[in-house]
Image: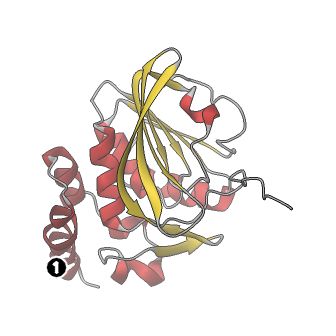
């Protein structure tokens, strides 16, 4: 797809997908208008980079649909001084968006092949305030905690306490929970040392995070 067509597709994505889905934060919209999403998509799917769909990126993983990424970014209300944690680097596109909004980003990816692809793409975009790690974000505390924002890019059966504990007071976490369709997108805010508030934002469907703990099955 030639550059002019990609520019038009990006414009249409914002106007026809992002804005109609109640995304009004101009900081988020500005980033989605500027950052080339196609640069983070596999070569064979670049023509789908701005469509309302999930894109395969390898290892059985997919890029989120653009409108979900936009709602995630808006919900987290990321400030320039914030320290962010991303669970699941994936293609690196959401990582890049977080990096443009926050002071720094720690991003964890369980698949080394995806991590190295994302590293290359981030470098190509001149993004330097990201620390990438080939690790499982559900295994213990992440070095650098607590974080002001946490973005979980795969669904969990329920919000993981281990992640909630790594929020700073006033910190926000976006996480999709549930094991059936539809699932719920939640904003979790830490309001004190031992209290959190959860707001359900919308219903959606998102593939499970790798190694997500599975709920116990009742037996009779």
- What residue is drawn where x is 73% and y is 55%? 214
The image shows residue 43, relative to residue 173, as above or below, that is below
Within 10 Å of the Cα at label 1, are there few (<14), some (14-19), or many (20+) other Cα atoms? few
Residue at (33% x, 65% y) in the render: 66
Q: Is residue 124 depicted above or below 142 in this figure?
A: below
Answer left or right for 88 relative to 84: right
Q: Residue at x 53, y 59 (%)?
A: 90
Where on the picture, by quarter, is residue 59?
Answer: bottom right
Residue 174 appears in the picture as rendered: yes
- Quarter of the figure with residue 35: bottom left
Report x, y in % for residue 37.
33, 65
Q: Nearer the viewer, residue 181 or 119?
A: 181
Image quadrant in which the N terminus is located: bottom left
Q: Please, is residue 38 above or below residue 196 in the view?
A: below
44 vs 220, nearest the viewer:
220
Residue ranking furthest to the front: 220
Percent x, y for residue 17?
22, 70
Quick one: quadrant of the C terminus?
Answer: bottom right
Compared to residue 86, the image places residue 157 above or below, namely: below
Q: Secondary structure at mark 1?
A: helix
* Residue 148 visible, this angle: no
Circle 1 residue: 4
Relative side of 148 to 112, left or right:
left
In the figure, is residue 36 to the left or right of 192? left
């Amino acid at each position: 797809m030639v550059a002019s067509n990609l520019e038009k597709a990006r414009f249409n994505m914002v106007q026809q997908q992002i804005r109609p889905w109640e995304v009004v934060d101009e900081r988020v919209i500005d980033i989605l208008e500027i950052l080339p999403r196609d640069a983070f998509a596999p070569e064979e799917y670049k023509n789908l980079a701005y469509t309302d769909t999930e894109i395969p990126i390898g290892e059985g993983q997919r890029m989120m649909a653009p409108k979900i990424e936009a709602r995630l970014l808006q919900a987290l209300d990321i400030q320039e001084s914030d320290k962010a944690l991303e669970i699941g680097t994936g293609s690196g596109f959401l990582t890049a968006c977080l990096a443009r909004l926050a002071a720094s980003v720690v991003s964890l990816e369980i698949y080394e092949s995806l991590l190295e692809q994302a590293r290359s793409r981030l470098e190509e975009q001149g993004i330097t305030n990201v620390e990438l790690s080939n690790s499982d974000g559900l295994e213990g505390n992440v070095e650098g905690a607590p974080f002001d924002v946490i973005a979980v890019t795969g669904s969990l059966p329920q919000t993981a306490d281990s992640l909630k504990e790594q929020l700073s007071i006033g910190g926000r976490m976006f996480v999709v929970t549930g094991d059936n369709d539809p699932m719920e997108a939640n904003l979790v805010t830490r309001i004190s040392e031992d209290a959190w508030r959860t707001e359900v934002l919308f219903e959606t469907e998102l593939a499970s995070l790798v190694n997500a703990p599975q709920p116990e099955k009742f037996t009779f």
